[in-house]
Amino acid sequence: MPVDRSLYIIPNDSPVCQLDAEDAFKTLSEKERKYAHYVAKASFDGALAVFLQVSPESAPIFYVLYRLFKAETVDQLKEKAIAVGFTEAEWQAFLVYTAAFYNNSGNYKGFGDSKFVPGVEQTKIRALIEKSAVGTDEKVLKTWESVESKIGSLQTTELQLGFGDKGVTCYHSSNVTQEDSEKIDRFFKQRNLAFWNTRLFKEVGADGKTTFTIKLASSEEGVVSEPEEFEGVVIQIIRGDYSLLMKRTHEWLAKAIPVVANKNQEEMLKKYIEHFKNGDIDSHKDGSRYWIKDVGPAVESYIGFIENYRDPAGTRSEFEGFVAAVNKETSKKFQALVSNAEEILKQLPWGADYEKDTFLKPDFTALDVIAFGSSGIPAGINIPNYDDIRQNEGFKNVSLGNVISAQPKQKMNFLDEHDEELMFKFHKDSFEVQVGLHELLGHGSGKLFQKNADGTFNFDNNKVKDIITGGPIATWYEPGETWSSKFGVLASAYEECRAEAVGYVLCCNPDILKIFGYTGELAHDVKYVNWLSEIRAGLLALEFYQADQKKWGQAHCYARYVLTKVVLEAGKGFVKIEETKGEDGKPDLHFKLDRNLIDSVGRPAVNAFLAKLQAYKSTGDFEGGKKLFESYGAVGETELQWREICIARRKPRRIFVQPNTVENNGEISLVTYPAEVSGVIQSFVERYDAKAIEELYTCWKNDYKWF
Ligand code: ZN
């Protein structure tokens, strides 16, 4: 079946939302602003690496677009575009493409991993480049030639991220298969190595011998471990991936050291700098340890190779760096939630044996993002992702207030008018509750049963009973095994599902809603809107199901869909999804959730499911967990029909425009841009100096032969 190109074009009416950090920035002292500025620069420069992680053409597209928009203003370019034959709509489409490209850090959606292409033919883009101020620049033209056939093409294997035989990725060279990556998994496990900041490259020599090169992200180059035999192949580890970009990152971090607020921040930065220099994960872990201890800072940040959602193997991570200022009012609510966490945890459907020995009270703050470098901006974060630190030393939660509040006024599909009104009215409130519960008591809860290196266990093997079988615990994590290594590609979606379910269940508790300031009728509305919004989101998630490959991409979508299936199965008319005909005569859906049945039907169903999720997670029973999860994740005939309607009626996703911090005579100011696609483009052009982009280009050239 030919691909419907329109599905891969970012719509011209995509809403652009301001990531409003002005008030938050104002609260910072001069010193704090400097600190924020340097860490923001480190975050954004480091995040150029994401373009090298996503697709082979992302870095060169960045190069061309940057040079184009750096040399001339949007208005000047528009005039030339119209002269070479762009229509008004095509020009807008080109701007939308460019803004979305920057916003997603590449030409695959940060949310959903599918490719997007310009809504204008590449021959016209070429004509524009040739007519532009960089039209005679050999480097620009040559770079454009190398991506011209890729930018708009929609071959089956290019539609989404995946291993080279099915999709696109730059976490691995294009010849790496799933089987290869599993072999490397075994190697990593045997050597007790960490994946986070690595990429994998495969070479088959003239003698037929296969060599795998594992590259660590670092500014320094060199050999980490000499080539050695493993299961019939040769494996070597070297450092120096994205070398120039990592150098920029640690140089900016070094500038932040004189303006730190305390000793923890200083030690943290020193460790991060070490990490970005030599690629050693232990340095980053140590940095994260200092970071956990830096409780309630005025300027919060985190930086490194953090989330592994986008690696087809589910282990290698995307670069991410952010800086944010604390919103003191909302943070108070979250701190109250933390204070009550131990009591609240008891309401979760597993006993004390399945909970950590002591709940490590995390720092939980509400932040307004000043800078976020990565392929997307989440609403909340629970980090670090290192299991051993999370379990034994602690973690931090953040809720990103200005991300949550940046809601475009779009029509909401499938809802009654009254429900839509309620959604507009209470979405921010309910989502704040959901994010708080999801991060703190979702990701923050539960214990992994681990066998220690000395043969002892971190649980009482004679006493603890298996939630599913009622018998003794039969499986656990062996030394060196972690949640991600054990659950692999399913780990992200499964864990997101567990955290989401915790939010659904706990938001029904009036005492918890009271902590957030909601009582009486208001509390009922917030709870209802949370269920309505989340269960409906599980329906809309179908957009992100890859029907041709029978595969789920985006972890959060998969997670929400599973929970929507759980409550549909619970029946009793709690959730109704009916096919209807829209006013336009085309197929439509009607979504209804009975608010009177949340406590009697919805909550018990999710609670029972949540207990099972935790049981399989705690015991490291991947087979059991996979079977359960995939049974609910299955997409049948009816759901495929719903999916068609969801796709036909989908609303464009928001594009963020972020501010820049700028240093002038030793003073830092915040520069904001209009909430338009041209504002997004301008923010990028001003964010990066020309040298940084030349260095991105050099990194890309070094990579080129692998893809
Ligand atoms: Zn989460």
Image (cartoon, grey):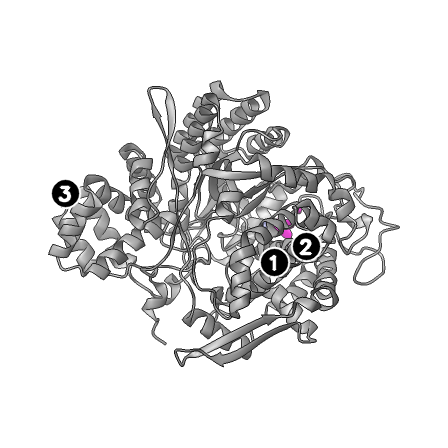
Q: Residue at x 42, y 63 (%)?
A: 651
- Label 3 and label 2: CA atoms lie apart by 56 Å
Residue, disc 1: 530
Closer to us: 510 or 294: 510
Q: Quadrant of residue 262?
A: top right
Label of residue 133 in the image: 3
In this rendering, the answer to whether 238 lies above or below 29 is: below
The residue sitting at 24% across, 46% down in the picture is 64
Instruction: In the rendered view, tell whether residue 540 sits above or below residue 225.
Output: below
**Along the viewing direction, whichever of 194 and 132 lies nearer the viewer:** 132
| Amino acid type of the residue tagged 2 in the rendering | Cys
Dots 1, 2 in contact, CB < 8 A: yes
Name the disc covering residue 631, or none.
none
Q: Sequence order check: which comes first, mark 3 or mark 1? A: 3
Asked if the magenta segment contains residue 484, the reply would be: yes
The kind of residue on which mark 3 rests is Ala
Task: Name the outermost residue toward the right.
Answer: 462
Tell me the amino acid under the disc marked 1: Asn
Q: Main secondary structure of the magenta part?
A: helix
Give the residues drawn in magenta, as a range: 481-486
493 w.r.t. 65: above or below? below
Structural crowding at the residue carrying mark 3, measured as other residues with C-alpha within 10 Å and reported as few (<14), some (14–19) or many (≥20): some
Mark 3 or 2 closer to N-term? 3
- Disc 2 within 8 angstroms of ligand 1 (CB): no
Q: CA distance from mark 1 to mark 2?
A: 8 Å
Which quadrant is home to the N terminus?
Answer: bottom left
Q: Position of residue 466 (x, y in %)?
A: 81, 57
Where residue 230 appears, as percent x and y from the top left, is 56, 47
Mark 3 CB in 8 Å range of ligand 1? no
Q: Which mark's residue is nearer the viewer, 3 or 2?
A: 2
Residue at which label 2 appears: 507
